[in-house]
Structures are given as C-alpha cells and as structure tokens.
Image (spheres, rainbow, N blue to C red):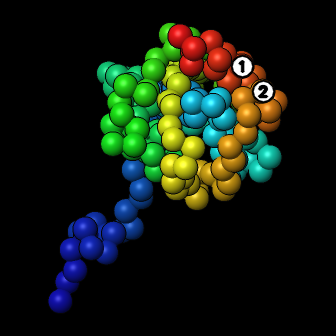
Amino acid sequence: MPSSAASDGLRNDAAPMSPSPRPPKIPESVLVVIHTADLEVLLIERADRPGFWQSVTGSKDAVDEPFELTARREVAEETGIVVGSVDVPLSHLRDWGMRNVYEIYPVWRHRYAPGVTHNTEHVFGLQVPRDIAITLAPREHTRSEWLPWREAADRCFSPSNAEAVLQLPRFVSA
C-alpha cells in the first residue's frame, strides 16, 4: 500500500524532500533580565557555548511582532516561566525603554540575511518569585543560576547584558 508524502517525507516521484530553508533571523531582539524583588538575577548558560552566561534573549519571529510578545514568548521557551500567570502577572514585565545596537558575533551571522551585521536589542525586566520553577530548553541552555545583581553582571558574556543587569536597581526602585 503506497504511503503519503506527508507520512514518509517523500514526494510523489519518490525523491527525498529537502527541509525548508529556515528564514533569516530578524535583527531585532529582546533581552529580558529576570529578577526577584531582592535583586537576584537569573542567568542561564548557553548549550552551544559552555561558560557563556546570559539573561533570556531572542529575536522577533515576525517583523510586526510586538516586542512585549517576543519577550513573553522567549521567557516561556527558555525558562518555562509563563508571563501573565498567577505567579507572574503581566504587569511584572516592564519595558525599560533601553535599546542596544551591537555587532552580531561573526559565529552567529549565518543566521541572518546576507550583509546583516548589527542587531537592535530591546531591554525588559521581569520580576518573579525566587522559588519559581525554571524549566530550561536543553538544546539552548544547560544550567541556570540565581545570583546577586552585581555578580550576575560580572558573569554575563555580553557587554549589553551586563550593562542591563547593572541598571536593575534603577528600574526596581522606579
């Protein structure tokens, strides 16, 4: 009995289907500093770069995707934290009004359209309870750690991430 292309990955002419090429990343992203009321900061270690610690980051999925939605999606994907839940009300996600334009590391430029060398990052803060469950996406991150904000800034591999963490007291007291 013949099988369908959808079930076996073959076209009608039985030639193997090639995967659809992934569209280039949009060079607009979010950085979300997840923190407690006591200024502890959650950092996550990149799976593809051991020793590279960071806050939640991620690019827009569509040019017209609102940055708040990007931030909420990336937080859920990378940590399992659901913004808008009972434990983490939507009001705890704050756009800090900070923008960083930085050169994309050469090792990651292949993810973007040819000629794209810079990204604009929009910074958010997210206050969560210290005992919130963290569920990492294992293909992206291998470990998480809560650190006092100054120590967290020192651990960040990205200068823009470190600078955002250093701004945390300004936004929490605001």
Q: Is residue 44 visible?
A: yes
Q: Is residue 158 visible?
A: no
Of 14 and 120, nearer the camera is 120
Horizontally, residue 31 falls left or right of residue 150, namely: left
Disc 2 is placed on an element classified as helix
The reply to whether dot 1 and dot 2 touch (C-beta < 8 Å) is yes
Q: Which residue is mark 1?
A: 166
Of 81 and 104, nearer the camera is 81
At x 51%, y 41%, the residue is: 129
Of 26 and 5, nearer the camera is 26
Tell me the kind of residue under disc 1.
Leu
Q: Position of residue 19 (x, y in %)?
A: 42, 56
Label 2 Cα neighbours within 10 Å, binned few <14 / some 14-19 / many ≥20: some
Of callouts 1 and 2, the N-terminal one:
2
Q: Position of residue 124 (x, y in %)?
A: 51, 22
Marker disc for residue 150: 2
Tell me the kind of residue under disc 2.
Arg
Quarter-wise, where is residue 173 in the image?
A: top right
Above or below, 36 against 19 in this view is above
Above or below, 81 against 27 in this view is below
Q: CA distance from mark 1 to mark 2?
A: 7 Å
